[in-house]
Amino acid sequence: KFSRSTINEYSYGSRSSTSCKKSRLSTSCTLFGSAFSPTQSGKTYLVACTSNGLICVWDSTGASTEPIIRVEATTADKVLYDVQFIESSGDTLLVVSGDPGILLYKWSAFLNAMDNLIDGNVVLEPIAKFKPHPSPSDAFGEPVEINCSSYSAVDNMLYGGAGDAFGCYQWDLRSEKLVGTFGGAENNRCSGDYLHDVLSIPNNNHLVLTAGEDGAITFWDGKERKLIETMNVQNTMNTNKQSVSWQVQNKGFGSTQQWSNGSNLWVSSMDNKGDWLAAVGGSESGNNMSLRSGPNTAGFMATWHLPTRTFNSGSVTRESYNAITYNQNLDSFVSGGNNGRLTFWDSATGECTGRSGC
């Protein structure tokens, strides 16, 4: 159903940059998070954050592979992990998560900088900064990074998933104050259970979901910050083997193989379409799985019915998945991971419907 297509490749830096900026831009980096901007005046931009503290903005038409602007959001030794756009009080805001915590920018400041561009390297101050507590597990008391964020427009709350004993942070976007934390050691969550994703579903009784290294998806009452339920993905798929298929890379889809015990899973990413939740991740080891760093890293994709928290379907794959999102135009969940392809999943059945070209 999906044919090979040409996708623009983007460079994050220019060799012609001068002074101190040159060292940062000439150093290899990793792009962690990316998002398309809302379309305004017929223009859409691609925004990504880097492992050396830059926010890069490209023309999404691919007119140039070089970023239009590069914003030094933090020092070069700090990493930025996630970007997303939100709408709040009539403003389009860019939310950037990483080592500095969460940085909040007005998108209009980026647009103005591009309209009045003199040099591609731009300094923009965030309108707000949200910082986590100093981590009790760090001997030096340094604050940990915020790996991901999610916004609830219903009550104007901003959630940040971290890698410390506090788990998930909750800030009031209007007052810029920390409301509280949940998901940490006080709720029997080990400080080592690093959160990879947080998903706010405010129209569903202020529901907040967290997921990470412990291989569980945890349901929280975001208003009361109380634990509702924890679903262990591995146990769920072991219990529902008849609903789990084995997806063999490059050899078609649909051949069934039972999910094996002994696979230590992590959950990388979640998204929902209404009442349907999809999650992806990978495995440390196990009979069907190989080491995360190995060439044949393996993983899973699974779906649940949110109101009843009932398992719907699951697929075990030879590659791990790092991200998943729901695409309204395709009415499909789209995931990406170690195989270098996009994988498309039916939003109702959770079945794999195709993959993009390499």
Image (tube, helix red, strand yellow):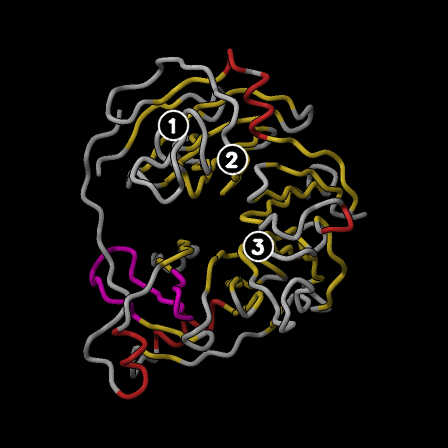
The quarter of the image holding the N terminus is top left
Give the number of the disc on residue 149.
3
* Label 3 CA crowd tier, 10 Å (few <14, some 14–19, many 20+): many
Give the number of the disc on residue 265.
2
In the picture shown, does residue 138 fall above or below 260?
Answer: below
Whichever of labels 3 and 1 marks the residue nearer the N terminus, that label is 3
Residue situated in front as seen by the camera: 30 or 263:
263
Give the labeled residue for mark 1: 317
Q: Mark 3: which amino acid?
A: Ser
- 162 sits left or right of 321 in the view: right
Whichever of labels 1 and 2 marks the residue nearer the N terminus, that label is 2
- 153 sits left or right of 146 in the view: right
Q: Which residues are magenta?
A: 48-68
Whichever of labels 2 and 3 marks the residue nearer the N terminus, that label is 3
Q: Position of residue 212 (x, y in %)?
A: 56, 44
Q: Position of residue 22 (x, y in %)?
A: 27, 81
Q: Mark 1: which amino acid?
A: Thr
In the picture shown, does residue 236 fall above or below 96?
Answer: above
Q: Residue at x 23, y 66 (%)?
A: 66
Q: CA distance from mark 1 to mark 2?
A: 12 Å
- 256 sits left or right of 274 in the view: left
Q: Secondary structure at mark 1?
A: strand
